[in-house]
Amino acid sequence: MERKKWFLPADLILLGAIVIAAVLCFVLTRRADSASAAQIRVNGEIVETIRLRDLTETETRTVGGCVIAVGPEGARFLEADCPDRICVQSGLLDRPGRTAACVPNGVTVAILGESDLDAISY
Ligand SMILES: [Zn+2]
């Protein structure tokens, strides 16, 4: 019975370590998965990369006939002078890898994750 006494704290520490590791893993994965920046391109050229974390409220950018709203939660085409308005219908882009394009205007908006930003910060 005396051995059991000594085992318990060790078991708790191990359990605690597993829980902490799991939480860390979850937090890190979520952070990597959250939208970090919106990148606006015109005809393939990067016009602006906006860090969403730096934004406190939604801002707009007018690029090539398109009005793009960028806020802490993501980015979206707000208005566009194109005939199809597929870009506006794309709605909110809130995850890394999400993109919307206004083909007639050659404007694309892409959401980058934290890992993408590390790759482009030179
Ligand atoms: Zn459009």
Image (tube, rainbow, N blue to C red):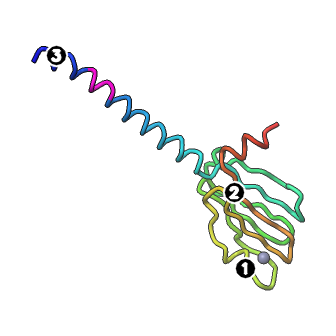
* Image coordinates for residue 121, horizontal then vertical, percent: 78, 39
Secondary structure state at the residue bearing disc 1: helix
Would you say 22 lies left or right of 29 here?
left
* Residue with the mark numbered 1: 86
Q: Looking at the image, is 78 positioned above or below residue 12? A: below
Quadrant in which residue 119 is drawn: top right
- Residue at horizontal 79 percent and vertical 65 percent from the top: 108
**For mark 1, does the 10 Å Cα neighbourhood hold few (<14), some (14 to 19), or many (20 or more) residues?**
some
* Residue with the mark numbered 3: 3
Magenta stretch: residue 80 in it?
Answer: no
Dot 1 beta carbon under 8 Å from ligand 1: yes
| The one of 59 and 101 positioned closer to us in this rendering | 101
Quadrant into which the N terminus falls: top left
Q: Looking at the image, is 78 positioned above or below residue 113? A: below
* Residue with the mark numbered 2: 111
Magenta segment range?
10-14
Q: Looking at the image, is 121 positioned above or below residue 80? A: above
| Rendering quadrant holding ligand 1 | bottom right
Q: Looking at the image, is 109 positioned above or below residue 27? A: below
* Residue type for callout 1: Ile
Secondary structure state at the residue bearing disc 3: helix
Q: Earlier in the sequence, mark 1 or mark 2?
A: 1
Q: Measure the alpha-carbon separation of dots 2 and 3.
A: 56 Å
Q: Earlier in the sequence, mark 2 or mark 3?
A: 3
Would you say 5 lies left or right of 12 here?
left
Secondary structure state at the residue bearing disc 2: strand
